[in-house]
Image (cartoon, coloured by chain):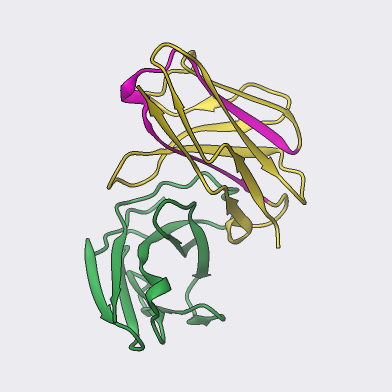
Chain colours: A green, B yellow
Amino acid sequence: DAKTTQPTSMDCAEGRAANLPCNHSTISGNEYVYWYRQIHSQGPQYIIHGLKNNETNEMASLIITEDRKSSTLILPHATLRDTAVYYCIVTRSSNTGKLIFGQGTTLQVKP
Amino acid sequence: GAVVSQHPSWVICKSGTSVKIECRSLDFQATTMFWYRQFPKQSLMLMATSNEGSKATYEQGVEKDKFLINHASLTLSTLTVTSAHPEDSSFYICSASVPGQGIEKLFFGSGTQLSVL
């Protein structure tokens, strides 16, 4: 799996968009970008994933650069409940669950 | 949606005793489950892969005799911390994926906070 780099922490005002970057410059052609988040003292939760096209679901949007070396997770209207650690993971779609978590980004949504 | 249940949510035990943590897939059969450990303010660290009907595969540096994993059925994996010591105090999390699906269908338990006195 390709290594990822994320900022350690970020703040966001409630109601504003939260943009969380992730660098994955060594990503391979068959690797996807996955995002999970972990709210304090809970298990991680899947958010979204993508290969090369931008993706959107009910939780977030994922923007992947054309060269696929970086991506941005966007929470369009952050709420206090979005305060969590966000993990960007790059792995093949054949991965059945053996995930290597980096340090992630701690997002603090402030009122 | 699919749910993974983990029990207990928290446990306190005396040093030297053993503690068992259960991980159940509630509405799907999981041939493979994963166990993670997380220390305060740190990321999740993969401990082992639990395989139904066969031996678990442990990550480098994880003592298999100390962290016993049993995956006797398609819906249950257990992690037993044997002869627990204070340094084993940690947050333990399991996960399982719906067979044939990608890790977007990977679900995590709510975790077990173990405190060893």
The part of the image, by quadrant, that contains residue B20 is top right
Please state if B116 lies on the left or on the right of B48 as rendered: left
Q: Is residue B51 above or below residue A97?
A: above
Q: Nearer the viewer, residue B8 or B109?
A: B8
Q: Nearer the viewer, residue A47 or B9?
A: B9
Q: Does the magenta portion include B93?
A: yes
Q: Position of residue B57 (x, y in %)?
A: 54, 26
Q: Does the magenta portion include A5?
A: no
Q: Position of residue B37 (x, y in %)?
A: 42, 37
Please state if A93 lies on the left or on the right of B115 as rendered: right
Which residue appears at 35% of the width and 22% of the height?
A: B117
The part of the image, by quadrant, that contains residue B116 is top left
Which residue appears at 71% of the width and 38% of the height?
A: B31
Which residue appears at 27% of the width and 63% of the height?
A: A6
Q: Is residue B82 above or below residue A80?
A: above
Q: Position of residue A35 (x, y in %)?
A: 45, 65
Image quadrant occupied by the N terminus of chain B: bottom right
Q: Count of labels shown?
A: 0
The prevailing secondary structure element of the residues shown in magenta is strand
Q: Nearer the viewer, residue A2 or B99?
A: B99
Q: Is residue B54 above or below residue B100?
A: above
Q: Position of residue B63 (x, y in %)?
A: 43, 18
Please state if B42 lies on the left or on the right of B107 as rendered: left
| Magenta highlight range | B75-97
